[in-house]
Image (cartoon, rainbow, N blue to C red):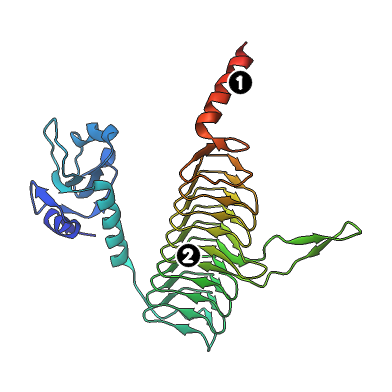
C-alpha cells in the first residue's frame, strides 16, 4: 500500500488538514506510529498518543478538536473507526490475485466455477458444485458434491463443506470450520444402546455471513439448518441440527446452541453461552458471558445473565443479596 493523504481523503470521503502529499505505506496502532505509517484515533482513552505520534497521517473524526499541537497530517472523516475498516478492505482487495487454479487440486468435470475463481493446493471440489465469481478457496479445502457457493466468498484453509450445502454471497469461512457434518441425533433402544439417526438435510448460509475457525454447523436430519444474512459467528462455536440463527445476530467464541432452537434477529450471545434445544429466543436479546438459556425468551430486547439465564437486573439484585448473606 502506498497512498497520499489526499488519496486517502478521496477514498474515504474525508478532508485533509496538513500536508496533502504526506505518504503512508503501512498501518500501525496510534501508540506505535512512525513516519510512513497511517494510524487512526477513535477511542478517547488514546487521545494522549495523538500528541506524541510520529505517524505521517492520522485518521480522526470530523468533530475532533485537538487540545495540543499535532504533528501528523490529519484526515478528517465522519467515523474514523468505520473509515479504517473501509480502508483495510480496500487494501485487502488490492492484494488479492486471482487465477483459475493450481495444478495440485481436484475439480470434478461437472463442477462449474465462475469468473476469476482462485483455487489453492490440494482442494477437492465435487460433482455438480457451483462456485460464484471472484470466490477464493485456499489450500486443503473440501467441497462436497452438489454444493453451491456464491460470489466474492473467502474459504480459508482446511474448511470442510459437506455435500448439498448452500452458501450465499460474500461469505467468509475461517480455517478449519465444518459446514454440514452430521447432527448429534441418536435414539435410545430397549436394550439401552443407541441407534444413530441419519441426517439427510443440509445447511443454508445467507449473504454477508462470517464464521470463525473450528466452528461446526450441523446439517439437519430433514430440511435445513439456517444461518440468515449478516450473521457473525466466532471461533469454536457449535450450531446443532435444525437451528435457525436470525439475521445480523452475533455469537462470540465457545457458544453452543442445541438442536431445533430459533434465535431471532439482532441477538448477541457473549462467550461460552449455552442454549438448550427446541426453544425460541426473541429478537435483539443479549445473553451475557457463560450464561445458560434453558427456556423460551419471549420479550424482545432483554439482557440475560446467569445459569439459568434471567433478566440481568434481577440477577444483579439476587447476587447482591447472596453476597451480603455470604459476608454475614
Please state if 93 lies on the left or on the right of 54 as rendered: right
In-front residue for pair 208/96: 208
Question: How crowded is the residue under tag 1: few (<14 C-alpha within 10 Å), some, or many (20+)?
Answer: few
State the separation of the CA atoms marked 1 and 2. 47 Å
Residue 272, given in percent of the width and then of the height, sits at 57, 43
The quadrant in which the N terminus is found is bottom left
Q: Earlier in the sequence, mark 1 or mark 2?
A: 2
Residue drawn at 48 percent across, 41 percent down: 302
Residue 201: x and y in percent read 63, 71
| Residue 249 as seen in the image, left or right of residue 258 | left
Q: Residue at x 41, y 63 (%)?
A: 208
Residue under label 2: 156
| Image coordinates for residue 122, horizontal then vertical, percent | 53, 74
SS under mark 1:
helix
Residue 163 location in percent, x, y?
60, 75
Dividing the picture into quadrants, the one containing residue 327 is top right
Q: Quadrant of the C terminus?
A: top right
Would you identify the image quadrant in which residue 33 lies?
A: top left
The residue sitting at 9% across, 54% down in the picture is 21
Query: In the displayed structure, would residue 72 be above or below residue 313?
Result: below
Reading the image, the residue beneath label 1 is 322
Determine contact: label 1, label 2, CB under 8 Å: no
Find numbered disc 2 in the image and state the secondary structure of the residue it sits on: loop
Amino acid at each position: 500500500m502506498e497512498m497520499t493523504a489526499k488519496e486517502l481523503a478521496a477514498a474515504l470521503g474525508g478532508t485533509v488538514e496538513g500536508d496533502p502529499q504526506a505518504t503512508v505505506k503501512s498501518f500501525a496502532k496510534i501508540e506505535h506510529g512512525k513516519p510512513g505509517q497511517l494510524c487512526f484515533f477513535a477511542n478517547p482513552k488514546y487521545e494522549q498518543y495523538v500528541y506524541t505520534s510520529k505517524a505521517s497521517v492520522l485518521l480522526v473524526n470530523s468533530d475532533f478538536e485537538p487540545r495540543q499541537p499535532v504533528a501528523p497530517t490529519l484526515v478528517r472523516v465522519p467515523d474514523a473507526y468505520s473509515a479504517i475498516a473501509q480502508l483495510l478492505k480496500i487494501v485487502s482487495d488490492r492484494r488479492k490475485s486471482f487465477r483459475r487454479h493450481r495444478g495440485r487440486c481436484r475439480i470434478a468435470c461437472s463442477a462449474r466455477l465462475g469468473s476469476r475463481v482462485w483455487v489453492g493446493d490440494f482442494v477437492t471440489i465435487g460433482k455438480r458444485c457451483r462456485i460464484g465469481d471472484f470466490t477464493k478457496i485456499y489450500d486443503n479445502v473440501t467441497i462436497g458434491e452438489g454444493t453451491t457457493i456464491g460470489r466474492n466468498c473467502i474459504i480459508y484453509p482446511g474448511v470442510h463443506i459437506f455435500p448439498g450445502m448452500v452458501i450465499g454471497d460474500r461469505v467468509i469461512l475461517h480455517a478449519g470450520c465444518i459446514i454440514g457434518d452430521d447432527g448429534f441425533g441418536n435414539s435410545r433402544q430397549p436394550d439401552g444402546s443407541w441407534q444413530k439417526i441419519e441426517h439427510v438435510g443440509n445447511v443454508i448460509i445467507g449473504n454477508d455471513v462470517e464464521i470463525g475457525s473450528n466452528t461446526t454447523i450441523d446439517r439437519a436430519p430433514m430440511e435445513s439448518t439456517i444461518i440468515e444474512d449478516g450473521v457473525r459467528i466466532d471461533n469454536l462455536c457449535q450450531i446443532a441440527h435444525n437451528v435457525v440463527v436470525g439475521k445480523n445476530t452475533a455469537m462470540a467464541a465457545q457458544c453452543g446452541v442445541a438442536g431445533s432452537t430459533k434465535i431471532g434477529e439482532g441477538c448477541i450471545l457473549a462467550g461460552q453461552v449455552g442454549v438448550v434445544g427446541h426453544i425460541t429466543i426473541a429478537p435483539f436479546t443479549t445473553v451475557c458471558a457463560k450464561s445458560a438459556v434453558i427456556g423460551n425468551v419471549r420479550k424482545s430486547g432483554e439482557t440475560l445473565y446467569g445459569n439459568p439465564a434471567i433478566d440481568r437486573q434481577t440477577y444483579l439484585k439476587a447476587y447482591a443479596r447472596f453476597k451480603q448473606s455470604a459476608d454475614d
